Amino acid sequence: MEPEKLFSRHPLANGLTLEFWDLSRSILGDRWQVVLEARIVIPVSAANLPPDLPVEEGEIRRALGPEIVFSQRDERTFIPAGELLETLTEMETRLLTLAAAYFGHPEFAGRLIRKRYAEYRQRQSRPTQQIQQ
C-alpha cells in the first residue's frame, strides 16, 4: 500500500486551510487507482461556533473533540501511470472551483460543527438495543 502524500495546500478566505492528499495506489501493472482527498481541519473553538448554537463551547468540545475534519474524496480507476499527475491535477482543479463558494464560505466551519454536533446528539439519544435471548 502506498503511503498518503500531501499533494497541495490552499488557504481559504475564511481562515481555514484546504489540503489535498494523494491516496493513490498501484492496482495492476502500470495501472493506478487515483484517489485525491480534500481535507479541512476545523478547530472546535469559539471563533468557529455558529453564534446561534445554544450550547457552550466546552460541551461541544467534549462531544466532538478539539477539532473536526471535513473530507471529500474523488477517485478514478485504472489510470495509466503516465497520467497519474495529470489526473490528480485535474481532480484538484475541479475541487478548487468549489473551494471559494463552499469551503471558503464564512459560515462553513460553523455549519459543519452544528451538523456534527446534531449527529452526535442523535446518536446519544438512540435507545441501546438489547439482545433478546
Image (tube, rainbow, N blue to C red):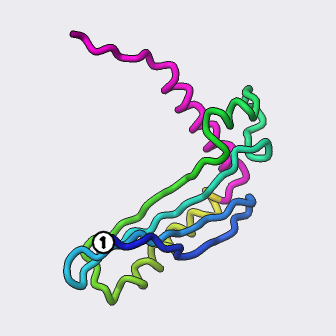
Outermost residue to the bottom: 82
Q: Is residue 57 left or right of residue 114?
A: right
Q: Check the picture and name the quadrant holding the C terminus.
A: top left
Q: Check the picture and name the quadrant holding the N terminus.
A: bottom left
What are the residue bounds of the magenta stretch? Answer: 104-133
Indicate whether 33 appears above or below 61: below
Residue 110, percent from left and from top: 69, 43
- Which residue is located at x 76 percent, y 29 percent? 56
Residue 39, percent from left and from top: 55, 60
Indicate whether 80 appears above or below 95: below
Where residue 104 sits, quadrant-wise, is bottom right
- Which residue is located at x 57 percent, y 52 percent? 69
Residue 111, percent from left and from top: 64, 42
Outermost residue to the top: 133
Q: Is residue 14 magenta?
A: no
- Which residue is located at x 40 percent, y 79 percent? 87
Residue 102, percent from left and from top: 61, 56
Q: Is residue 115 magenta?
A: yes
Dominant SS of magenta comes to helix
Q: For the residue carrying disc 1, how many other residues have a C-alpha within 10 Å: few (<14), some (14-19), or many (20+)? A: some
The number of numbered badges drawn on the structure is 1
- Which residue is located at x 63 percent, y 37 percent? 114
Badge 1 marks a residue whose secondary structure is strand
Which residue is identified by label 1?
Answer: 33
User: Amino acid type of disc 1?
Assistant: Gln
Indicate whether 58 appears above or below 7: above
Residue sitting nearer the eye, 71 or 128 = 128
